[in-house]
Image (spheres, rainbow, N blue to C red):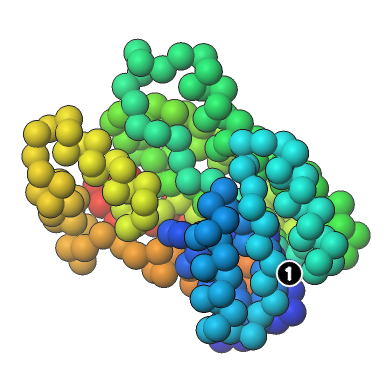
């Protein structure tokens, strides 16, 4: 399928590993020029080199901490100066750490809100004006299936991802007449650094080994295995494509929930 996004420009946040890296590689394979970002410069440069070796895409790397508004502004400014207007924005920021409710203080909640919700809002506000001018744009938020079924011990994530989902839907209704789609991808158990941390937390809480916890998680999935980041990358790329708002297909304001288990992570 021709996604008709060759020579488009995308910002992919948190793209040094996991879902962000997989999405960046898939987009680059379709001819999209990329701005990739991460707090870890060493990992980021390694991913940049890897994608350049595998594709013909132009790649710009920017070290950025999405908790910091100035870093977000610098990320957008460098992206725009190097590659021009942004056509596609992949909002991705990992997720807040696991915790029980009573151990959380106000600072924990505010920090999680800043990372999980405000990073997406700030970047979207920066890219939207030129998307509106060109009457074309794609904003995709990588979230979690926990918006459907809250996960025990993930109070911050369960609460704030629902806020992102509501914001995403409201924004999609506002900008759809301008040719801009806004969607959320909500994966279940997918092999990322975050799921490894969650499985370790469950291991410590239950006294079971990490291998036992992973086997239990996999047993709840019809294919009996935890998903891989690459499994989601094609879906993200489709949502970034021309086809998602074509004559026969019109998807906007959706939360595409990828059910991989009855106890999602």
88, above or below 73, in the image: below
| x and y percentages locating residue 31 in the rendered image | 65, 81
Foreground residue among 129 and 21: 21
Taking the spot 64% from the left edge, 52% from the top edge, the residue there is 63
In this view, which residue lies farthest toward the right? 133
What SS does tag 1 mark?
strand
Apparent side of residue 197 relative to residue 236 in the rendered image (left or right): left
**Where on the picture, by quarter, is residue 53?**
bottom right
Q: What residue lies at 70% left-to-right and 77% top-to-bottom?
A: 58
95 relative position to 102: left or right: right
Q: Quadrant of the N terminus?
A: bottom right
Residue highlighted by disc 1: 9
Crowding around mark 1 (Cα neighbors within 10 Å: few <14, some 14 to 19, many 20+) is many
Q: Nearer the viewer, residue 198 or 81?
A: 81
- 229, above or below 3, in the image: above
Q: What residue is rendered at 74% in x and 79% in y? A: 7
Quarter holding the C terminus?
top left
């Amino acid at each position: 399928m021709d996604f008709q996004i060759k020579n488009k420009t995308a910002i992919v946040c948190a793209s040094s590993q996991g879902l962000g890296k997989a999405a960046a590689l898939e987009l680059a394979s379709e001819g999209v020029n990329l701005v990739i970002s991460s707090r870890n410069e060493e990992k980021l440069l390694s991913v940049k080199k890897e994608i350049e070796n595998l594709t013909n895409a132009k790649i710009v790397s920017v070290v950025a901490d999405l908790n910091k508004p100035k870093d977000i502004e610098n990320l957008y400014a460098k992206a725009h100066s190097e590659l021009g207007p942004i056509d596609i924005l992949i909002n991705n920021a990992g997720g807040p750490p696991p915790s029980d409710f009573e151990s959380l203080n106000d600072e924990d909640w505010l920090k999680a809100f800043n990372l999980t919700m405000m990073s997406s809002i700030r970047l979207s506000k920066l890219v939207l004006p030129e998307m509106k001018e060109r009457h074309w744009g794609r904003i995709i938020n990588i979230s979690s299936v926990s918006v459907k079924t809250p996960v025990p011990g993930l109070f911050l994530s369960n609460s704030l991802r629902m806020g992102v989902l509501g914001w995403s839907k409201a924004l999609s209704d506002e900008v759809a007449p301008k040719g801009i789609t806004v969607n959320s991808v909500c994966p279940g158990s997918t092999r990322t650094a975050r799921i490894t941390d969650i499985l370790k937390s469950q291991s410590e809480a239950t006294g079971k080994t990490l291998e036992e916890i992973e086997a239990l998680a996999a047993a709840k999935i019809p294919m009996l295995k935890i998903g891989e980041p690459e499994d989601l990358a094609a879906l993200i790329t489709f949502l970034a494509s021309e086809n998602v708002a074509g004559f026969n297909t019109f998807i906007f304001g959706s939360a595409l929930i990828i059910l991989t288990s009855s106890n999602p992570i």
